[in-house]
Image: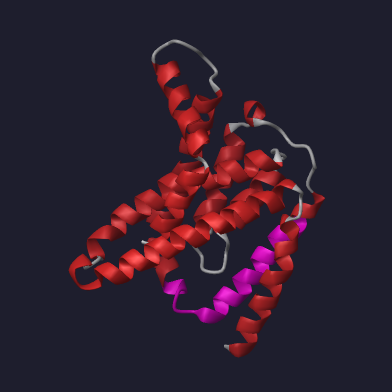
Amino acid sequence: MLHLGTLLAVVVYFWRDILEILHGIRTTLGGKGKDQQGATFFLWIIVATIPTGLIGLIFKDWFETLFSKPKLVGVMLLVTGLVLWLTRFTKKEGRPIGKMGWIDSILIGIAQGMAIIPGISRSGATISTGLFCGLDRGLSAKFSFLLSVPAILGATLLELKKIDFTQEFWTILIGTIVAFGVGLLSLTFLIKINKIGKISNFSYYCWIIGIAIIIIM
């Protein structure tokens, strides 16, 4: 439900892009236009979602065992920091959506699937992978967050049956609302940082927290 709150933040922030995707799908299916940017964007989201879904379903039980190993979180934060730090060597001007291919989508989808491991940042992994593939900074961030919509929605639907709303309604509601608000603020901040090419600065934070967790545990 906390993830659902951040999902709503993504929908609110990127509502224009979501409408453009829906318009592209409608015009393409209606035969009124081809090579619509919105339809192309939707296609690559579907392609990227496939490896994410397969990784989640096949390795679900194994991933869940990792959540009982706090020291692993510290190690994976160090890995996240390294991945973010390496983005400083990517191109300033990357490829637009029109030059994005299925290999880019699959690699980003795999990165999102691996982010199920605690300590691996989903947005950090997917944005960085997009940059490593040579995509534009704005496109990498936009694709990363819109790609989270089917992944989070699917996971929410799978876990929804486990929630006892009669006993935990207000706790769940407050948590979801707070996640939405913080998610919207964080998203706004991250997009700006990514546009100026400073996303690698988050690596130092990850390294500090990762080392602290390893020492404490």
User: Residue 188: x, y in percent?
Assistant: 60, 52
**Residue in the foreground of this view, choosing between 43 and 184:** 184
- Please indicate whether residue 119 sits to the left or right of residue 63 in the image: right
User: x, y (%) of residue 59?
Assistant: 42, 60
> Which residue is depicted at the point 41% across and 69% down?
64
For residue 59, say whether it is visible.
Answer: no
- The answer to whether residue 40 is above or below residue 190 is above
Within the magenta stretch, is there residue 89?
Answer: no
Considering the whole magenta stretch, tell me its main secondary structure. helix
x and y percent of residue 193 in the render?
Answer: 70, 53
Looking at the picture, the colour scheme in use is secondary structure
Q: Taking 165 as reference, is 132 left or right?
A: right
User: Which image quarter: residue 177?
Assistant: bottom left
Q: Nearer the viewer, residue 130 or 145?
A: 145
Q: Which quarter shows the N terminus? A: bottom left
Give the quarter of the figure containing the C terminus. Answer: bottom right
Pick out the residue farthest to the bottom.
216
Relative placement, left or right, of 215 versus 87 is: left
The residue positioned 78% from the left and 47% from the top of the image is 90
Which residue of the protein is positioned furthest toward the left in this rendering? 166
Residue at (60% x, 89% y) in the render: 216
- Asked where in the image residue 135 lies, by quadrant, the reply is top right
Residue 60 screen position, x and y as percent: 39, 61
Q: How many numbered marks have been drawn onto this rendered protein structure?
A: 0
- Residue 157 seen from this side: yes
Which residues make up the magenta segment? 65-86
For the point 54% across and 49% down, which residue is it? 110
